[in-house]
Image (tube, grey):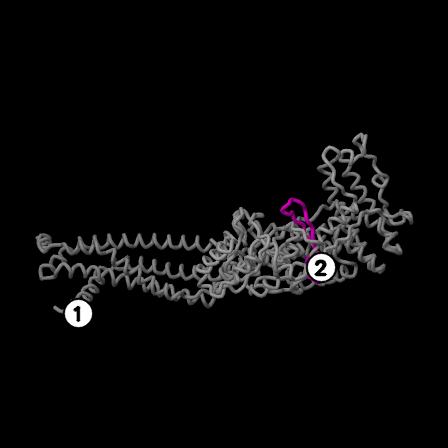
Amino acid sequence: MKSAEVASLLFQVALRNLWLYKVKTLVIGALLAAGSFLAIVGLSLLSNVEKSMRESIIESVAGHLQIQSMKAKDSLALFGGEFFGRADVGSFADFAPYRDVILKHPNVDAFVPMGLDIAILGRGNEMDDVLDALRAGIATGDKRLVRDRVDAVVFQLGQLSLELAERRKISAGDADAAAQEADVERMLAPGAFDDLLSVPSEREAEPFLQFLETKIAPLSGEKMPIYLGYLGTDMGLYTANFKKYRIVEGEGLPQGERGIMLSQKIRETQLKNLAARLFDKLDKRVNKSGVRIAGDAENERTAADLPRQYSTIVGQLDRARAAALSEKLSVAGFRGEDAPGSGDVAKLGAQLKAFLTVNDENLNERRTWFYANVAPLIRLYQINAGETVTLRSYTRSGYIKSLPMKVHGIFSFEGIEDSDLAGATNIIDLVSFRELYGQMNAASRAELEAMRAQVGVKDVSAETAEDALFGSGSSGSVESSSAATSEVPASPSDVEKGDVLKTLVVKPVLPTSFNPEEVRSGLALNAAIKLKDFSKLEKTREELTLALKSAGLEAKVIDWQTASGLVGQFVNITRGVLIFAIVIIFVVALVIINNSIIVGTFNRIQEIGTMRAIGAQRSFVLNLFLAETGITSLIGAFLGAAGAVVLLVSLSRVGIPATSDIVTFLFSGPRLFPSVRWPVAVGAPVAMAVMATLTSVYAARHAAKVQPVEAMQEKE
């Protein structure tokens, strides 16, 4: 019989047997279909996530490669290390030699010096804000404006009085607390601000303002400090090479200018009016995550906190705006007639409390109304483009360095605006970064020397320190000056016309601009390297390492995934878990296939013996069993592959929504639109079918050994 005829007969008999033993066929086919489906969907999604995450990391901060000092104690982690703290990633005293070597490589497109660190954003408190507004109003000389600002101060004093009364409950008998409460009550007394409303100049108002700022405002405590992670870099190179960076508000940070670009995510989540933030949080959880307010502990706490924010809103309104808002609330059905106390302020407070009480039914309507009618009347953000903030940082030498920084603009990374990982980074110029890091330039050294000269600082030995501080023969006590013990005036009229407060004034010499050449060399902690051809990344990394070493410049050259920290390992971990799951399923499938064939062999001994008796060779029986397994495996695996392709094509049209900020970062946007990886879609089922067929060789060989006499004995 010809080989083609044998093959045709094998195929026909195999199909007949598959139909006769349908249960076994279905079990084997289903297992292979499930394995193929999981492999194609899982590996395709993983490949898409890896591509998206790679884009998020490379085009926002990391570049394709990063260099880091060999002396670093910690690994570079651009998106957070193991403990998300202030890591010691080393530094380059001058990055220029490294740049010159790296840019010679034909596959390198750009070299961007960088440095990551953390600073504290000082924000004062609500009383500080209204006092700043009052001071600005006095400077204008507009009595009506001053009166409105005084109203805001009085409102904050009332809130502070309530807060101090609560403190008294747990600190009864504290003399300092009683004195503080007395100061506040004195400011709330009728007529306390009358003189301030009629003062002719800022100078006459100064003592009264200083009393409020130094004695009253600190009683409110300080707002929770905000720790800002910031990236110092050459802004010209950065904006030219990182395409996800985009300006949301304001202007970009010009080359050669000091300043900061503030992250939109930071401003939205930490520097926004708290009532607005609470509305946003509820909107995100209720409308985007589908978690109702009722029955959810976190949502219920957020909703309960919302009405308490009425005082912050009232405190920001002048008389005209307060009246306008009260009228709008009345029209909307919030009357406030039963408000405790009297006056327009009490009424507006009651209206706002009622308005800010939300539930699942009214949340969307009231959030929309808030942004349309309340937000335009208040300071929605604590920091806006064009304003100046102060960053305080502990330098590597251990002292505190403060820098005033102009907020040139607000930025985000396109597609990953909602990601906490991407939004945690703010951007400043490289020269200011060096100042906060602790490196002193010529201007800083001149400023320090001026301060030393003004206060008469001189070096003394440990043995003469006491005499230098207290004078020879000092008893160890210092007589207090009258200025230190005199009572601060309670009103501008209490100040003698000739009194002048003697204070040490050191004018900063920090310029607002710098020579752009300063960022062409000097200190950097790390640097991003952009490549022309991504496919040659590993080869380029090895070649750059050798080139730097040959030039006597040792540095770690790491890829984007390693440089990103724990985030970059997500794909590796997920891939490992997925492959492990596929292997487990496949091993189980192979065991079942092998056992099924062995059991089937015992059930088909008579059939096999008959075939052998009529002339079928062992090779025919062996090939028959292999053909049965091969056909079943191919059909099952490709059916699973077809289901996987259909699912992926459907998902590519509607997208997979990101369920959290971290997933948004991994998806490089709010939705992932996966594509079919055809090499995987074709290769996976073929590989599974081949392996399943090869696994059945043992069972098939066992079947081929059945002798005709065994079939005859079975008949008897």
The answer for how far apart the CA atoms under marks 2 and 1 are is 87 Å
Q: Residue lying farthest right?
A: 497
Q: Which amino acid, mark 2?
A: Thr
Magenta span has 390?
A: yes
| Nearest to N terminus: mark 2 or mark 1 | 1
Magenta region includes residue 369: no
Structural crowding at the residue carrying mark 2, measured as other residues with C-alpha within 10 Å and reported as few (<14), some (14–19) or many (≥20): few
Q: Callout 2: helix, strand or loop?
A: loop
Horizontal side of residue 664 vs 161, given as left or right: left
Left or right of 152? Residue 360 is: left
Tag shown at residue 512: 2
Q: Foreground residue, 336 or 699?
A: 699
Residue range of the region highlighted in magenta in the rendering: 375-403
Q: Secondary structure at mark 1?
A: helix
- The structure residue drawn at horizontal position 78% and vertical position 58%, both measured from the top left corner, is 318
Residue for badge 1: 4
> Which amino acid, by three-letter code, is at mark 1?
Ala
Q: Nearer the viewer, residue 621 or 442?
A: 442
- The residue under the point 74% across, 56% down is 316
Report the side of 119 relative to 619 (left or right): right
Does residue 521 show up? Answer: yes
Give residue 212's position: percent from left, percent from top. 80, 48
Residue 285 showing in the rendered view: no
